Amino acid sequence: MKDLRILAVDDDRAFQMVLQGTLAQLGYNDVTSVPSAAAALKVIRNSPHLFDGFLLDIEMPEVDGVELCRRIRAMSVYRKTPIIMVTSLADKQYVYKAFAAGATDYFTKPLDEIELRARLQVMRQLVDERQRALDLLDELKSWSDLPKSKIKFDAPLSVISANWMVEFLAMQNHLLTLNRLQLFGHAAIGFTVTNASEAFRLTDQVGYIDYLANIATVIAETLKTSPFSMAHAGQGDFVVLTNRTAVSDPKGLQDEVRTGIASYQKLYGSLGLPIPTIQVGRPVSASIFSQRAEISSLLDRARMSSQIGLEEGFTAQKQWN
Amino acid sequence: MDSTAAKKLPAGLPDVLQAAHQVFINLTTDRILRIEVLTQAIHKGEDAASALIEIAQIAHKIAGVAGTLGYPEIGDNARALEQKLKADIAAGDPLRHWTTIAPEIETLLDDLEALL
């Protein structure tokens, strides 16, 4: 397995060495450590190779970790590179700002080896996911009929390069950083392509990603009046995170998406692909008293709702009442 | 590694962290002296907010590694001190708990001196 090339930024030399030693124990040996945001930006500018991920301390003098995160994100080559924030418990409230600045994940000091291992696994998954997307993009550009990379039907995948498209893991991590009030203001809505497995079987990987990208664009067009982010969770399931009040009529939304998809009927026909059948789920929100486990399952519940569908969901609900 | 730090190595510290331990011990002398200068400045009525912010930053660094390097009690005390200082600074009244915080700073300094 390729070693991840990591840049770690922390102004405490002792912590840098603890981090570097622990990372080496976990098998991550390609780690560059610098003591400040200014030094980090210099290394990034002068490095002949791209970094696979960043570990940024939040509390640093002059330019702090949140601002450094924002500056790294502003570089087009690092727009989607995993950035993991390192914070103390006293600074945990700044994690929300870090996510707003584009951070992917975080862990707390003092260092816990198990937690660090888990965070780096997330980093590796994101790097692999991005690599698959880049390989596919290369294939699209070269019009190759023989895709070299492997995508899995069940795996999350960034299907289109747009500012509203995020990785599924990043969306899950973002939810966990919201305070109760912020969380209460959000809703997750699932969109299931019920015949996605048929399209996956009938086309090659480039065709499948194009198929999903088209669906994502249609969904985005129906949501354009409210701010939202979207992730593809795998299995033809999309999850949208938006304002709690944005979708009051999921049935109307479903009709609008289906109408949008129908306008591409000829295109699907010419490609020999089935017209995507979209089911929209009910908006799923956390209550003000939600526990961490309930928050973690919010996106899964949104997926489940769209997999069941509004009609059957309604019948099931009536049977319960 | 210098012999002073080698004598102070906590039992069970992984080999991979011994160099970090050395750096932590070397930094401790300067940190003790800096905290003493800052607390004296507060007692003299100088800019308390700036001094307390810097003490909180030093406590933050100690809290970040002390536990990992075999000193969990120092790490916990530094973290508690950091949180209290930051809460008072954020509330706009950095000295509101000074009478209880000053002895905690003294305890932390004593614990750090014992490492040298």
Image (cartoon, rainbow, N blue to C red):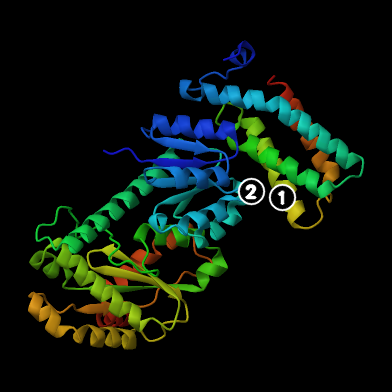
Q: Nearer the viewer, residue A180 or B59?
A: B59
Q: Position of residue A168 (x, y in %)?
A: 35, 61
Q: Position of residue A141 (x, y in %)?
A: 20, 63
* Quarter of the image where the C terminus of chain B is located: top right
Left or right relative to A242: residue A231 = left
Q: Position of residue B81 (x, y in %)?
A: 72, 41
Count neighbours of disc 2 (C-alpha within 10 A) and say few if under 14, some if 14 to 19, many if 20 or more. Answer: some
Task: Provide the residue designation for mark 1.
Answer: B86
Q: Position of residue A174 (x, y in %)?
A: 46, 60
Left or right relative to A116: residue A262 = left
Label 2 lies in what chain?
A
Q: Residue at x 61, y 31 (%)?
A: B66
Q: CA distance from mark 2 to mark 1?
A: 8 Å
Q: Residue at x 65, y 41 (%)?
A: B60
Q: Nearer the viewer, residue A231 or A213?
A: A213
Left or right relative to A254: residue B106 = right
Same chain for the residues at labels 2 and 1, yes or no? no
Are the residues tagged 2 and 1 within 8 Å (C-beta)? yes
Q: Is residue A115 visible?
A: no
User: Vertically, is A44 above or below A266?
Assistant: above
Left or right relative to B75: residue A316 = left
Label 1 lies in what chain?
B
Q: Secondary structure at mark 2?
A: helix
| Residue A90: mark in rendering | 2
Q: Residue at x 51, y 68 (%)?
A: A183
Q: Secondary structure at mark 1?
A: helix
Q: To which quarter of the image does residue A260 belong?
A: bottom left
* Quarter of the image where the N terminus of chain B is located: top right
Amino acid type of the residue tagged 1 in the rendering: Lys
